[in-house]
Image (spheres, rainbow, N blue to C red):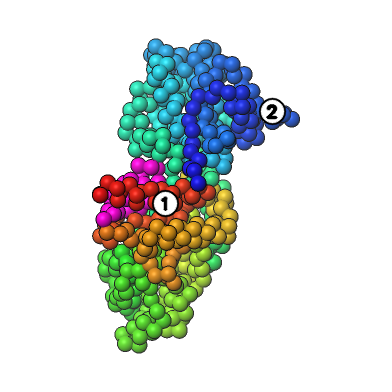
Amino acid sequence: MAIEELKFKIANTCSEMDAIHGLNYRTFVEEIPQHQDNPQQKLIDKFHDENTYIICMKGKDIAGMLALRDSRPFSLDAKLENLDSYLPAYRSICEIRLLAVEKKYRNTAIFIGLLNKAFDFAMQQAYDLCVISGTTRQIKLYKHIGLKQFGPLVGTENARYQPMYISIKDAMAFRDRSHAMNINSKTMSTLINCLPGPVSLSEGVVSAFVSEPVSHRSECFIERFNEVREKLCHLTSARKVNIMTGSGTLANDVVASQLSSLKGKGLILVNGEFGNRLVEHASRAGLVYDLLQTPGGKSYKRNELEKQMQEQGAYSWLWCVHCETSTGVINDAGLLKDVCQRHKIKLCLDCISTVGSCEVDLNDVYLASATSGKGIGSLPGLAMIFSDHCATSCNKQLPRYFDLSLYEGNQGIPFTISSNAVYALEAALIQTNWPERFRLVENLSRQLYCQLDLLGLQILADPEHRALHVTSILLPDGVSSLEFGDFLASQGIFLSYRSQYLISQNCVQICFMGNLLLDYKNLYEALQHALVQIRKSAA
């Protein structure tokens, strides 16, 4: 099946102009209430005849657009008196307007492609300065690209814009230092994110993250913050969850700190790299524990666990990675719960790669760690600690930040936390139909298994213990995992392959996390193409 590429071009046909008017209406009438609606559901810009439109086409559909115009007066001239007084010296200037991307196609590749084409056009026309009215919903994003704010906000109460400018020199400098902006047009047209992080973001996440921040002490924020906690508990069947600024590593440090207040020794299960990391967390926290190890690609059987309990005596707690991401093995949480309940052991799970990626039931789990930047489809930066109990004040020698009782006694917010990060997490939780997402992950993984079988590629994890959202692939002799991953990256398909635990086994890893775009068919073609090209070059 042919790959349906994204095509970035200057609009020049009647059908393209008609599509522009439709996208203009959907964006600036229906989504951003800047203009009045009309029965034709078309919005023709007042400067239409003077605009140069850069568009992105996906097949016959328009996926995105922006317009450039160099005739004065600009739209900003009508909104700001003496516009030039705000601007640096320039020789030739243009205005960028009408930046819009269809909701179903919103992703980094389209935004980057439109900007790249706009920068190239500006260079060809010898402009040295561009001005734009940036929606307040995306100010941080515009700043990241290098645009500078000037003047007061303009527009209506329902559609506020910030005047901004960028020199073409600065735009080119940003492109030179940005990996994403240097991806070639072929890469942008096939961009597929199969990484365990950063993941493709759910709809609305970026807009929420770049919104105006609010105080973490405001009543409105506290209410929404606790609604987010309720949504997380509903998603995982957990009794409680605390959210703090930090990574999944910090979440596991908090779990280790809480375990330090328990009497008795624990048991840590290790069947891969991330199990070994739990051992390091436990050692640094001064915990007393035994290890039960099994080879990578394998999981635990009931008789192994029962034998450990009988031979080594009573344990106070058991700590295990739910999904051993290094190998793509999912450990049976139901089995672990059952064994722990029979022996009156507190079960702790590292669910960093599973919450949001697959169904997770944290009922009767003493403590579990997770993060915002994996399966949930938000940005990284928030650590989550789920629990089935009310935390009490523990070891006073622990850092205050790790004391969960302080969170429960302060409406979940004892310390500063970013409203932007919380609202981004909220957007991901609200926008996702979780049962549908989990079915999609299963369908994608089944398709992947079939393709790998056809290609003669081996999956590292045992069939009965495979995580549907993480697949580690053993490459055959003569095919370097580094060369394989590099080749796919050059085609705009990003796998995980540079971690030492993957390199040592000549593995690459395909993850279905975050926002799942429905174009993974391109991935299967690319895997075959990569094998052929690398074998051909080695011959």
Look at mark 2 in the image and give the residue it sits on: 36
Separation of marks 2 and 1 at Cα, in angstroms: 41 Å
Q: Is residue 232 visible?
A: no
Q: Residue at x 26, y 68 (%)?
A: 283
Q: Nearer the viewer, residue 334 or 317?
A: 334
**Coordinates of residue 66 in the picture (x, y in percent):** 52, 27
Q: Type of residue at label 1?
A: Cys
Look at mark 1 in the image and give the residue it sits on: 194
Q: Does residue 333 appear left or right of residue 501 in this picture?
A: right
When the figure is inspected, residue 90 is found, relative to residue 318, above or below; the finding is: above
Part of the protein shown in magenta: 478-497
Q: Type of residue at label 2?
A: Gln
Sequence-first disc among 2 and 1: 2
Q: Residue at x 49, y 15 (%)?
A: 70
**Coordinates of residue 232 in the picture (x, y in percent):** 52, 59
Numbered disc total: 2
**Helix, strand or loop under label 2:** loop
- Indicate yes or no whether the magenta region holds residue 308: no
Q: Is residue 529 visible?
A: yes
- Indicate yes or no whether the magenta region holds residue 492: yes
